[in-house]
Image (cartoon, rainbow, N blue to C red):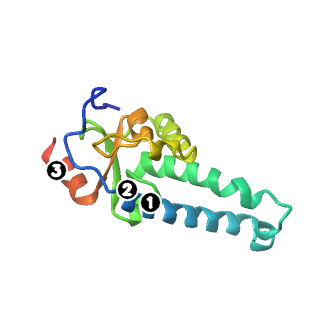
């Protein structure tokens, strides 16, 4: 995966944080539904179970990394019209382990709190990625930029 040189901004606009948070909420809701479908609502809501504690987070991390690698964004990003692209604006997201690391960083919550002026959070900087809207994604993928 190619990334923008350290200290330089990406040469295209990134998605707003509001839209990214909406995508995260969609992802979390979907991950919770997957866990409920797998373990059952009764097990999920039992106070002494750990199903509601960590399983949605694990499902989220795996789903988002896998969907980003295969489709260019997590389920929530796809639904809200966002995509993850290499910071250079061209190429593909080739390394699933890098994307898994990106999702683990998001799960730690710190990356969205540490971000650059170009709108990339620490998770994007570490993975050499950027989150963009569909119009920007189309422009990047059709122009060969």
The residue sitting at the bottom extreme is 42
* Disc 3 to disc 2, C-alpha distance: 25 Å
The residue sitting at the left extreme is 143
Point out which mark residue 17 bears. 2
- Asked if 75 appears above or below 132 in the picture, the reply is below
User: Is the residue marked by circle 3 packed among few (<14), some (14-19), or many (20+) residues within 10 Å?
Assistant: few
Q: Is residue 47 left or right of residue 85?
A: right
Residue at the spot of label 3: 142
Identify the residue at image location x=47%, y=42%.
Answer: 111
Residue at the spot of label 1: 21
Point out which mark residue 34 bears. none
Q: Is residue 64 left or right of residue 141?
A: right
Q: Is residue 49 left or right of residue 18?
A: right
Residue 62, x across and y down, in percent: 57, 48
Identify the residue at image location x=15%, y=42%.
Answer: 144
Return the disc, 3 or 1, that comes first in the chain's sequence: 1
Residue 33, x across and y down, in percent: 62, 68
Q: Is residue 15 left or right of residue 36?
A: left
Choose top left, top right, bottom left or bottom right for residue 120: top left
Q: In the structure shown, which secondary structural element does the residue marked by tag 3 occupy?
A: helix
User: Is the residue marked by circle 2 packed among few (<14), some (14-19), or many (20+) residues within 10 Å?
Assistant: some
Camera-nearest label, 3 or 2: 2
Residue 100, x across and y down, in percent: 52, 40
Identify the residue at image location x=27%, y=26%.
Answer: 5
Camera-nearest label, 3 or 1: 1
In the picture, the quarter occupied by the C terminus is top left
The residue sitting at the right extreme is 48
Q: In the structure shown, which secondary structural element does the residue marked by tag 2 occupy?
A: helix
Residue 133, x across and y down, in percent: 28, 57
* Disc 1 to disc 2, C-alpha distance: 6 Å
């Amino acid at each position: 995966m190619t990334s923008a040189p350290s200290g330089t901004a990406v040469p295209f606009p990134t998605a707003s944080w509001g839209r990214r948070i909406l995508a995260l909420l969609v992802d979390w809701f979907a991950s919770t539904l997957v866990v409920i479908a797998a373990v059952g609502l009764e097990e999920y809501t039992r106070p002494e179970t750990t199903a509601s504690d960590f399983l949605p987070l694990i499902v989220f991390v795996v789903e988002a990394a896998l969907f980003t690698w295969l489709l260019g964004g997590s389920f929530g990003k796809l639904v809200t019209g966002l995509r993850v692209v290499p910071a250079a604006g061209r190429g593909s997201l080739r390394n699933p382990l890098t994307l898994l690391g990106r999702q683990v960083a998001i799960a730690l919550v710190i990356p969205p709190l540490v971000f650059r002026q170009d709108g990339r959070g620490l998770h994007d900087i570490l993975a050499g990625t950027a989150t963009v809207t569909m119009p920007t994604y189309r422009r990047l993928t059709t122009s060969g930029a």
